[in-house]
Amino acid sequence: MRHMRLAQAIAVAATGLTLSASALAQSAPPAAAPYAPYAAPAPVAPAPYAYPPAGYAPSYGAATPAGAYGAPPGGWRAQPAGSAAAAAGPAEVERTTGTYVGPRFRWMIVPQFVQNVFADGGTSFGAPMIGAEVALRHKTFEYVFALSYASYVYQAPFKSKSDGDLAWEYVDANLKTLWATTDFFWAAPLAGERVEFLYGLGLGMGVMFGRLGREQAKPDGAGGIVACTADASGSGPAAGEPKNYCDRSNSRYGGYEEPSWFSGGQRPVFLPWLAVQTGLRFQIAPRVVTRLDLGWSLYGPVFGLSGAFGT
C-alpha cells in the first residue's frame, strides 16, 4: 500500500514537471534569424529637366554626379523623358523658347542729307523714342513687338525741289509719333553663349500728331533764311517785306499751322517704318537680358538700348 502511494506521488510529480517544461518552452522567445548582409539601393537617375526660356545656363547650377544640373533660383521646369527640351545640351540653354518684357529707348538721327534727297534746306536733328517691348524667342530667332513714343522738334528753312528759288518757307515743327513696330532678329553666339550678335530688320507704322508750323520766308542778308513778318491780320506780309519772297500766294504768315491730311492739309498722319538692324544681346542673369541696337531706318541711323526680364 505504501508502495502504491509512492508510485502515485512520483507519477504526479513527473506530470507537473512535464507541464512546467511545456509552459516554459511556450513562453521563451523564438530564436533570432541571422542578419542578411546590407545591400545599397540602386541609384535612381534624376528626372530630365528642361532649360527654361532663353534663360538658365548650366553654370548657374551645381553639376550632380549623374550629370543633371542643379536648379537655380526659381527652379527648372520638368519635361517628359525623351523630350526635345530635356535632351537640349548646354549650347541650347540660352536660346530655347522664351518671352521677355521690358523697356526700350531709341535715338534716331534725321540727317540733312537725307532730307535733301527730296527738298532743299533743312537741318539735321535727333528724335528720342521711348517705349516698351515684348520679345518672343525661339532658339536663334527672336520677334520683338514694341510700342514707342517719339518726339520731333525741328526749325529750319525748307522748300521742295520742285518749287522755284523764291519759294522758301520757314518750318517750326513740334511733332509726335506713336510707333507700332516689329523687329526680326537672328542671333549668332559670341563669347561662350553669353553674348550674341544680332542682325535683322524692323517693320512698322506710326501715327503722327502735333504742330507743323509753316511761314513764307526771305533771305536775312547774312546768308540765312528767316520767316517773313506778318501784317496785323496775321494772314499776309507786312508792309516793306520783299514781295518776290513774301507774296500773297498763300496765307502762311504769323504762326500758320499746317492741317493734317484728314483736314485737307499736308501734315502727314501715317508714317512707315523700315529699318535694317544689328546689335549685341547680353545675358547678364538667368532671366535678365540687355540689348544694344544699331540700325538704319528710312529716316536715318537709329541707336538703341533695351532691357528685358524673362517671364
Image (cartoon, rainbow, N blue to C red):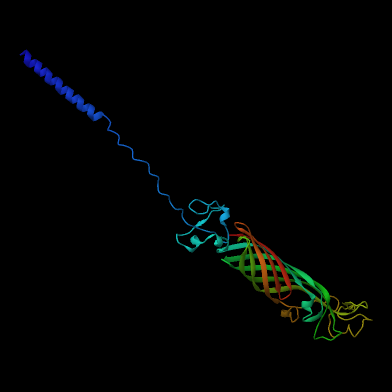
Give residue 40's position: percent from left, percent from top.
40, 45
Give residue 256's position: percent from left, percent from top.
82, 77
Instruction: Looking at this view, name the residue that lies furthest to the right.
Output: 240
Instruction: Looking at this view, name the residue that lies furthest to the left.
Output: 1
Q: Is residue 69 left or right of residue 200?
A: left
Task: Examine the image and state in which quarter residue 57 appears.
Answer: bottom right
Task: Examine the image and state in which quarter residue 24 appears.
Answer: top left
Give residue 168's position: percent from left, percent from top.
85, 81
Observer-nearest residue: 239 or 8? 8
Count of numbered labels shown in the rendering: 0
Q: Is residue 13 above or below residue 163?
A: above
Residue 120 seen from this side: yes
Observer-nearest residue: 253 or 305? 305
Residue drawn 20% across the image and 24% down it: 20
Residue 258 seen from this side: no
Give residue 211's position: percent from left, percent from top.
78, 73
Q: Is residue 174 left or right of residue 293?
A: right
Q: Is residue 241 left or right of residue 146?
A: right
For the N terminus, which image quadrant? top left
For the C terminus, which image quadrant? bottom right
Task: Examine the image and state in which quarter residue 17 appears.
Answer: top left
Observer-nearest residue: 182 or 227? 182
